[in-house]
Image (spheres, grey):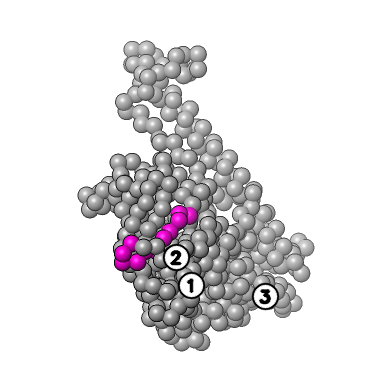
Amino acid sequence: VGLAQLVRPSTCKPCGRLARLNSAKMSTMGMAEAQRTRVHEEVEHALTLYGSEMFGLAMALTANAPDAEDAYQTAWARALSHWDQIQDPVKRRSWLASITWRSALTIRRRHRFVDRWHSPLQEGLDLSRAMDSDPTLGEAIARLSTRQRAVVALHYGHGYTLDEVASILHTRAGTVRSHLSRALAHLRLGLEDD
Amino acid sequence: MAKMDEGRIQEGLRQLMSHEPPPLDSESARSRGRMGAVGIGAGTFVLLFLVLGGAFILDHQSGNDTPSTPGAASSSHPSPEPSPSATLSPAVTPSPSGFLPALGPMCRSSQLRVRVGIQGGAGGNGITYLVFTDHGAGSCKLDGTPTVRFLNAHGGILSTVRVVDASGGYVPTFANNGVGLLPLADAGSPGSNGVRGQAALPLQYRDGACPSAVRQVQVVLTTGIITTPVAISGLQSPDCTPLSVVVNPFQPADWSP
């Protein structure tokens, strides 16, 4: 599983995402051979290091599996297209988290119309299934707003400080603290019902 | 929030972050419930639109001297002639790929022009896109994987190409049984030179894999043969293994290579 799937035989069915991945990979075709090889190797390495984490974040942000997959794959396509924007490897993790956040947000907005008919219970089921050791927590997190989920996932799941979370979400630290406090209040209620 | 609950959240989310991610090119299994909801919503909208649209047209046809009643739109009345102002949407046949319209008949070779698009590759693989543009009067489609022949400078066929009629090779591609040439954003505009749409044919090969210089490529369609000059550097290496080129199915191409 990895970047190689973008360049090796694929049985991918037609979908918008494939077009995105394809064009993202095509964007590296213009690079010099050495640069392209380096970028592919670095992305492959990052995928190994942060793939699970990014997908978990996408899952927490979207709270349903299909949207999480969309967000996750879109995020990697975007990362591949703009890989050299981040020269410092230390910053890559938070950069990838930021891309995943933006991808998830885009997908959530795109599905806002659909979500009017979409029961939040289904999202709770998806997330609780993914968090099978504590399904109640999954359901409680699914009931939070997308931004609250982002703050909780980045702070507790990834271990970022609230200032770092603010930087990833491109917002102020005070806003993050406010989201966290409300999220914890909602979670407390949800978990007390348990 | 008690520390114990924070620990519980931390533990739960850490577990969530340790799941194996899905493959990058997998197709997500969107829930039936969601698609069903979309279907019901869209269906209701279309039905409502048709009913209201039909009532509106009938109302206009009957004139202002006749008061319109709900009964006026009933099916017992003869069907009205199409109003000049009422435009009918062209019927779109769903394509096998599901996201592109299958438009018109098979493209005739006379209405197509072919040129060499992007050439590149990595990791010992080369890829050349042949780009087909539709200059005919109507939309048309290309389907499946055509036979491709490589010719030398004298027009002699160099070798038989291994054809793969499936998605595969260096670049992910779509299998297809007929997709319309992708209409370009500027199709029909003055600067588009009459191009109605375009498709690409990916040719994928190992670098340095050909015994002779390739000067032309010939694509055999069911409606004719198209030949175009091409220079494929990877296929002109003097010390090469027998020619083996993977020919993919026609692909939609919305870029301008």
Work out whether mark 2 precedes mark 1 in sequence or the reverse, and give the earlier one: 2
Q: Residue tagged by mark 1? A: B242
Q: Nearer the viewer, mark 2 or mark 3?
A: 2
Q: Is residue A18 visible?
A: no
Tag 2 near tag 1, CB within 8 Å: yes
Q: Residue tagged by mark 3? A: B18
Within-10-Å neighbours for mark 3: few <14, some 14–19, many 20+: some
A130 left or right, relative to A159: right
Place of residue B22 in the rendered image (x, y in percent of width and height, measured from the top left): 62, 67
Looking at the rendered structure, the kind of residue marked 1 is Pro
Q: Residue tagged by mark 2? A: B159
Whether callout 2 and callout 3 share a subunit is answered yes
Place of residue B240 in the rendered image (x, y in percent of width and height, measured from the top left): 45, 78
Report how far apart the C-alphas of labels 1 and 3 lie in the structure: 46 Å
For the point 46% across and 19% down, the residue is B73
**Above or below, B183 relative to A36:** above
Looking at the rendered structure, the kind of residue marked 2 is Ser
Question: Magenta span has A188?
Answer: no
